[in-house]
Image (cartoon, rainbow, N blue to C red):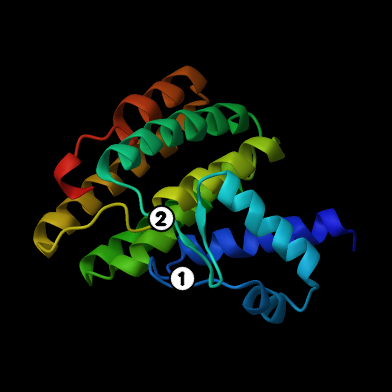
Amino acid sequence: MSTISLRNMATKSILDRIQHGDISPDEIITESQICDTLNISRTPVREALIELVANGVLERIPRKGYRICDIDQKQKINAYVILGVLDALAAKLSINNITDQDIRRMNETIDLIDIAIKYENYSSYCELQEKFHRIYIDRCDNPQLEKMLEEIKASVSRYTYFSENSEKLFTLCRAMNEEHREIVKFFERRDASGLEDYLINTHWITKHFDAI
């Protein structure tokens, strides 16, 4: 495997671990840890870490390693705006590539999200809602756009929404999942412009500032 392929593999592995909550905000990430986990040499891992620093996902801690960048509320909101536009573009590009099986998978994922909400399993909710969006993102046929989305998602992390009030948190989750059902309807109608507008101006709009 080429150095570039190994670097991309390392980058994706780190981003996935951040999004899934496997790396905590204050955890130190080292080259040796990533090398051991992926069983690859230092050069592609170092290049991946440098790339993630340049993209604002990680920050370098001298003589220690790297950690997830700490971003404030305004930065999160700004990142969410960008995320909404990019996600909407991916959806628009994918709309003619979505199959009936993809629609079924999205509906099945929505049902699983309902279960996660019922049992107040926020970790499961986050993983499933990411899976939902991933179904159509994978159909956009634009690897560069997919990479940009991964980096933006990692920069805000999966715990963008947080509230000590679980009732408030899961009320928000239920509302978001109802929006997932609306998204599926746009795909079923092949309504590209309506889907793009809905994702930007409804689903990803930062209307819950107090929960971010």
Q: Which residue is drawn at 25% across and 63% down?
A: 117
**Location of residue 36 with respect to 23 vertically, above or below:** below
**In the current view of this chain or complex, which residue is farthest to the right?**
1
Q: Position of residue 42 (x, y in %)?
A: 77, 70
> Amino acid type of disc 1?
Ile
> Amino acid type of disc 2?
Ser
In this picture, residue 10 sits left or right of residue 91? right
Q: Is residue 103 visible?
A: no
Q: Helix, strand, or loop for circle 2?
A: loop
Q: Nearer the viewer, residue 37 or 188?
A: 37
Label 2 CA crowd tier, 10 Å (few <14, some 14–19, many 20+): many
Q: Position of residue 166 (x, y in %)?
A: 13, 64
Q: Nearer the viewer, residue 182 or 66?
A: 66
Residue placed under numbered mark 2 in the picture: 157
Q: Residue at x 45, y 24 (%)?
A: 196
Residue placed under numbered mark 1 in the picture: 23
Q: Is tag 1's residue or tag 2's residue first in the polypeptide sequence?
A: 1
